[in-house]
Amino acid sequence: MDNSIARLNSSPLRYVAGISWPRSGHHLLVRLMSDYFGVTFKYCEFYTKSLDCCRQFPCSRPTSITFSKNHDFNLDINRDANVPCLVQYRNFYNSVVSEFELHVRVSGQGSDTKEEFHKHSIAKAKQFKLFKEKWIDAESSDNILLVPYEDLISSTEETAVRCIRYFSPDPEIDLDKLRLIISTVDGEKVEKSKILKLSNVGIHPSRDYRQFRFYDESWFAEITEILTA
């Protein structure tokens, strides 16, 4: 085994609590970090009921978990300033289009209509405004890392390096390894109520929300008013 890889797989990683707005590249980041750090990167999905999970935030097992997921759906999480947090978010318009595709994919979660999309996106816009005020616009801290989806997609290498250094005290980055991972990482696309798994595709740009089948200017104006009120 290459000595640099052996060193990476034996390096201690600190626990980081993940907070993410839905459809903001959380699983892409997890795949990048898992491929880079190897078996030492221990991830907890939190929402998968079959997992042996403590269901707490931050994780009650920080010595055995590297990164945990939480969407703070109810905005009731009290952040511990001593626990490093990584917060992921995305342009709201693109995120709500992607999330709506999942919303209608799940049986009983709503019909695939323009009216349902408007109702869903209005509710989510109100929630996003509060999420943004709490996690994104809050006073900056050395113990919080903000990771916009747009940076993860357009400046993947630079953003991944920031994240690697947030998890690991090791200042050395194996850029050759990281670039190979970025170029071959698995992806997914949500389209027409289906999740399409994409193997070894690398990073690809997201769809423009203005191309969504239910987009119109009146919807955009209404959502913008909610977000900026």
Image: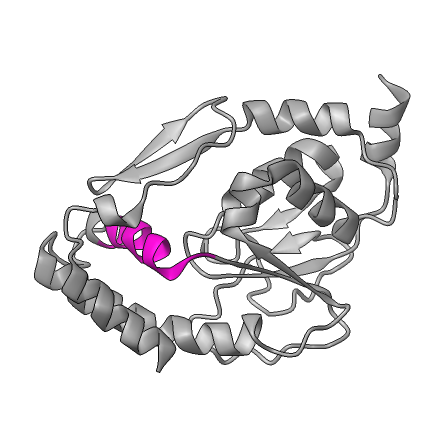
User: The magenta stretch spans which residues?
Assistant: 90-103
Q: Horizontal and vertical percent for residue 54?
A: 60, 64
Indicate whether residue 91 is drawn in magenta. Answer: yes
Relative to residue 14, is residue 203 depicted above or below?
Answer: above
| Principal secondary structure, stretch drawn in magenta | helix
Visible residue check, residue 147: yes
Find residue 176 and report its horizontal and vertical position in percent.
Answer: 75, 23
**Residue 169, image x, y percentages:** 87, 49
Q: Quadrant of residue 182?
A: top right
Q: Which residue occupies the foreground of this view, 12 or 55?
A: 12
Q: Quadrant of the C terminus?
A: bottom left
Going 76% across and 53% down the picture, which residue do you hit?
166
Residue displayed at 60% across by 38% down: 156
Q: What residue appears at the point 59 percent right and 55 percent down from the top-left corner? A: 147
Colour basis: one colour
Residue found 50% across the figure and 21% down from its top: 200
